[in-house]
Amino acid sequence: MNWEDLRHFVVLAQTGSLSEAARHLGVDHTTVARRVAALETALKVRLVDRLPRAYLLTEDGERIAQLARGMDEQAHAVMRTASAADPSLVGCVRVSAPPVFASVVLAPGLGGLATDHPGLVVELAGESHTAALERREADIALRLLEPAGEGLVVRKLCELSYSLYAAPSYAQDRDPAEYRFVAYDSSLEQVPQQRWLMQVAGPRPVVFRSNDAASLASATRAGLGVAVLPDFLAHADPGLVRLAPPVGILPPSRPLWLVVHEDLRRSARVRLVMDFLIAMLSAPVFGGGAKR
Amino acid sequence: MNWEDLRHFVVLAQTGSLSEAARHLGVDHTTVARRVAALETALKVRLVDRLPRAYLLTEDGERIAQLARGMDEQAHAVMRTASAADPSLVGCVRVSAPPVFASVVLAPGLGGLATDHPGLVVELAGESHTAALERREADIALRLLEPAGEGLVVRKLCELSYSLYAAPSYAQDRDPAEYRFVAYDSSLEQVPQQRWLMQVAGPRPVVFRSNDAASLASATRAGLGVAVLPDFLAHADPGLVRLAPPVGILPPSRPLWLVVHEDLRRSARVRLVMDFLIAMLSAPVFGGGAKR
DNA sequence: CATCAAATGTGGAAAAATGCCCATGAACTG
DNA sequence: CAGTTCATGGGCATTTTTCCACATTTGATG
């Protein structure tokens, strides 16, 4: 049995289509088809039903794909271990973080790192979904939710503070009872700062919604209303002014977690970027703290 | 990263030599060398130290070989599952058993099975060491020691009885005090029938030793002395006569275990051979029982 | 119903991997 | 010391694999 055939089969099983699998693998779709056929011959088992428009796994195919996925995990472990063993600082480190945080805080900071270490490429991925570190979708992740998972090393960096902001012209001389609000959309109903905002807003209306913090900031800057924004994003923005928090309801703050796979912890490249992030973000009163 | 390269590397890591690995894999040794080199390039890690006469794994190589061995286990699981899924009775079933038991009991019996099922090939391996069912060195194993292992299904078949035997001419009119003995060699000092024999023999001398029960039987048949032999081997042999056991010391008997990997339990081929073995060997008074 | 996009299937040409030959050097064996 | 085993390197014929262009089918859409 050819292991390379298995690798192709795993991807086919995940994608469900020859063409998709071929794109993922960077080969021609005919190659995937031939390899799967070869695997079937070797194992003497029909793994897929060849439908006109899609490949559908048979029952046996499902069972075997399940086992092969196990091999895939091991293969990723091999690659992580190999990557950690490479002592050079040349190569790519992929950092995943919440989108606004990535663009506002990390992008400028990490730029300097790249100039200090020629050959080091930092790939910054602003992603709202959590990247699978096990699959090496990222080497390092910064997250707002405490991550959990087999083989992951977690470290709390700091607290991100949130405050109410509005455009200066909007806030000036306006009775707080007439405030209108800018908020996350329904998909983010459960995040702490959104729940806090709803509590603060009470019966006052929400006039604009988005799932993207940058858009909320723009809308607020344009004078649509009052928003809760992370201080790192808003405190230095001349188009925004921080409002005093309502008494009695503590403004939200969220911890920022750094996660890395334990296999990569000792990689020279990853270590370098990690240390840089830790140094940059460990200050307890980070971002808008000074204004507080 | 090419998984085929990893497969070759696993074998190289196990064998420690290009040529050995090539023989195991059925390829040219240059291919193994080329593949390992390709793997090193892909992972950017030196996996082996090229000594003049042997490949020695580096520290990183050891780590990665360890992980790759995990993949190897998964690969075997894939193959077992595939084999179990094949509903046809065509193909090969490999049975491992203690050598004498294989040649005396199984070989004649299993022959009939092959004639009843054309296309079914039974491979009978008489092995003293225990075959690794996980690595598919055998599909079914018969063992005298209770097997243990992840994913193995074990079933007790029967008890194998042992008795004292000698050549008829040797036993006739000889004072038991003058018996001389035929026994296993020192490597089998700990097996039950050997310990029993030493107890029975007491101060009387052992004049011939071997690690092979068939050789012991031959030596006994030739009149060298008295041996403890499994009844299945000796009871129907006209050149041997069973001696009455000494009073007070119960003659040994050993359980016979059937083992199969759970993944293969439902394979049609394996099931067939298993059922055949169970039917053939489940009789509680198997072998020399009738003569007892 | 015609059209378009996306998917699989087919066959021949190009590219890559493999086996095999050789010679060389180094180390173990008797 | 001769013989054997093992790894290296180069070169080359052969086999295998892969790609590419094209045909075909299907389902969605206007």
Image (cartoon, coloured by chain):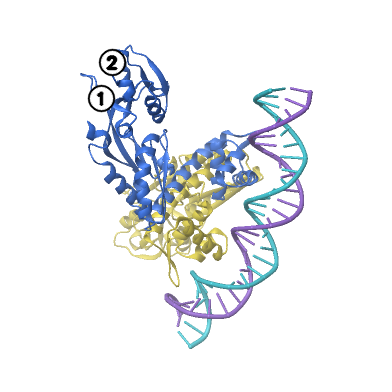
Chain colours: A blue, B yellow, C purple, D cyan
Q: Position of residue A156 (x, y in %)?
A: 27, 38
Indicate whether B106 appears above or below B206: above
* In front of the other: A65 or B91: A65
Q: Secondary structure at mark 1?
A: loop
Q: Seen in the image, is B93 located left or right of residue A229? A: right
Task: Please name the residue shown 52% across and 48% down the image.
Answer: B95
The 10 Å Cα crowd at callout 1, few under 14, some 14 to 19, many 20 or more, is: some
Query: The disc labelled 1 sits on which kind of residue?
Result: Pro
Question: In which quadrant of the rendered view does residue B183 lie?
Answer: bottom left
Chain to which mark 2 belongs: A
Q: Secondary structure at mark 2?
A: helix
Q: Which mark is residue A176?
A: 2
Looking at this view, is B260 or A59 the one in front? A59
The percent position of residue C5, horizontal first and vertical second, equals: 65, 33
Image coordinates of residue A231 in percent, x first then y, are: 29, 32
Q: CA distance from mark 2 to mark 1?
A: 17 Å
Give the residue type at disc 2. Pro
Q: Nearer the viewer, residue B72 or A28?
A: A28
Disc nearest the viewer among 2 and 1? 2
Which mark, by number, is residue A251?
Answer: 1
- The residue at 56%/45% (across/down) is A25
